[in-house]
Amino acid sequence: MAANLTLFFYVASMAFGLLYGGFRKRALFLLCAFSMIAGFAAQTVDLAARWGASSIIPATNLNEICEATSWGLVAIFLAFGALLKNRVFVFFLTPLVVFFQMAARLIPLVAKEPKPFYYTPWFALHISLLTIGIGFFLYSFIYSSIFIMQDHSLRHHRQPIALKLPSLEESVRWATRFLVSGYVLYTAGLLSSAIYGAVHGAKDRWHPGLLEAASLAVWLILGFAIYGWATAKLNPRKRSWLVIAGAASTLLIILGILWH
Amino acid sequence: MALSEIVLIGLNHKVASVEVRERLAFSDDEALSFLRGLRDAGAIRGGVLLSTCNRVELYADLGRSGVVETLVNTMLASRGLAEGHRGLFYVRQGRELVSHLFGVAAGLDSMVLGEPQILGQVKDSYFLSRDGGVLTTPLNLLFQKAFHVAKKVRTETGIGERPVTVSFAAFNLARSIFEDLSTKRILILGAGEMSRILATHFFESGTRQVKVANRTYERALAFAKAFGAQVVPWDTFPRAMVQSDIVISSTGAPNCIIHKAMMETVMKLRRNASILIIDIAVPRDVEASVAKLDGVYLYNVDDLQEVAEEGLEQRKQKAEAARQLIASEVEFHERYLEHQELSGMIEGVVTWANAIQEAEMSEALHKIGEITPRQQDVLRKAIHRVAHKILHNPITGVKRLVVEEDVAQAADIFRELFPVQEEQRENGLPPRSSSEGDGQ
């Protein structure tokens, strides 16, 4: 019931968000925000109930991780949304939330035996840090995409898009903030599982495999984007493409989970 | 709230040349003393005088005795204009006046369609009259409504979103690139008139870090004085570009002065930070291939003109929607005023009925002689109930007609039912006391 309600509210939120992008009416934005809050409440109740019932944080398979990612995206918006002055952000965010919700439902569920690692607080810490970290990367991805669109319209002298999106400078600023914050959390998330593996030995759960390699690839790509930013060796456009590539590389993690 | 007592007399850029408009223009002090003069002479009860470079309009509350001709004569005489200019003035009243003011405030009657400055100018005129004590209630209501409608037009139609002038287009582009223009540094190459216009736009938005370079140092100095800018020697302008975010180039150079190789070096030194180059010179000052560099946004005069024309086209489309919105707001405002009038009428009848009650009560008490306060209270309440019950049906009937949107009929019926003179209603005096009749 709660899961269906979640999807219903998120889809409503996406509809209002897309309409807001077209018509720019305050009422549409408010409807979008309220639907998102309602969906978030329903999803939190659902996740808490499932966590309580199984004693394992519901993020042990790809379906659950997709759902946790959608939860993380909305949680970040609720926490930092007021700082993002540009309301048009919902136009980009809500479809992403619905995408992860749909992925959680459509990907065939592969039931696996729970590992001892899942019952430890390390796993909850690991998953929380990674989910929020990836959430931040996706925010950075959205702002980088906005930058690319804005840059393209300005270069080709197409005024309409340029006027409605945040300025290039604002997009770069937020993309960078989210990228760096996400990188810190993501690194901490990777370290938490590595520490657990080092303490308990590879035979319990942790040993570097396909999933770990995929996670490390994402870490390297985004690390390179930050390096480019810090040294100003890359211009904002190239850096934006790199962030987009980095966010796309999170798909590697999904593949890693699938074949894990 | 008689709207019919308000009149508009004025002329604008569509009917009068700039020579006439500038002769008729009023400063704030002149406008206020003109309005006070008219009021003291009994020509108006109050007024608002809107005087901008494109229009001079007097919105006057004539009360019941004002004559439009007097106002036109006084306006002509006050500025020493010949009688022949009388034909230039337009006069509007009622619905036409309301529609005109709403359109003016929303920028639909402006030379640059949909420009936002006019709303500020209308507000300034309104505040001038209000603070000067020459604003009457009907004018106050009308102008407040005009501000509300103008804001609604801007937000609901988005008429002002797109730029329609080259300088505004350049300014908007800068806002698409930079977050806070007040912290940005501008370099102006060539101290000509177009540079001045563009620089004014940026200066008004709070940009204070302006540098100027010109081949003739003296001209650069004069320009710098006007904007508090810093003068850069002409041959060092490429170095100044490294520290600038916006470059406005408008020199009379026969060939390009900014080349791709030069910009590549500049961009390296800028650590690839974005730069907006506005080249409004003809022939162009900036090589077209410069636009291919990452982080460089180059716009020439044709690009800006194109943006401005697109904006104007869009504004024309949006103006149509704005006019429809204004038409419905005019109707709404008229109905609101009619309702106000009817409410006043009902209130007057109730006051009048209360006055009759009090008079009859005093008469009755006088005839009865001494009674206890409780008996007095019972008697007063009984009389009140009788009056209330008699008035109840006509008042609810009238209100029903109002709900059915037949305000005019409702007012007529109410007047017929209660042929109370306006003064009597306002003062609460009974037309003819029954007790007087009794007493005779």
Image: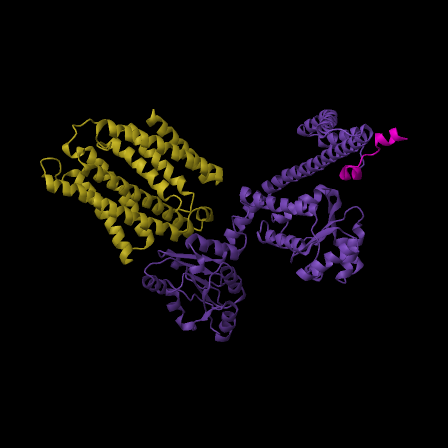
Image coordinates for residue B295, horizontal then vertical, percent = 36, 56
Looking at the image, is A221 positioned above or below residue B380? below
Tell me how many marks there are: 0
Looking at the image, is A133 positioned above or below residue A117? below
- Write the residue at 25% across / 45% down: A185
- Magenta-colored stretch includes residue B305: no
Tell me the colour scheme of the image.
Answer: by chain
In screen coordinates, is B259 left or right of B360? left
Residue A109 visible in this rendered orientation of the protein: no
Comparing B94 with B112, the one in front is B94
Image coordinates for residue A78, horizontal then vertical, percent = 37, 40
Question: What shade does chain B have?
Answer: purple
Comparing B261 with A38, the one in front is A38
The image quadrant where one finds the N terminus of chain B is top right
Question: Looking at the colours in the rendered structure, which chain would you say is drawn in yellow?
Answer: A
Looking at the image, is A260 positioned above or below residue B80? above
Comparing A24 with A4, the one in front is A4
Image coordinates for residue A171, horizontal then vertical, percent = 37, 49
Q: Main secondary structure of the magenta part?
A: helix
- Magenta-colored stretch includes residue B428: yes
Image coordinates for residue B17, horizontal then vertical, percent = 69, 58
Comparing B338 with B356, the one in front is B356
- Write the residue at 33% across / 34% down: A99
Furthest toward the right, the residue is B440
On the image, which quarter does residue B256 sit in? bottom left
On the image, which quarter does residue B245 sit in? bottom left
**What span is colored magenta in the figure?**
B422-440
In screen coordinates, is B177 left or right of B125? left
- Write the residue at 46% across / 62% down: B248
The image quadrant where one finds the C terminus of chain B is top right
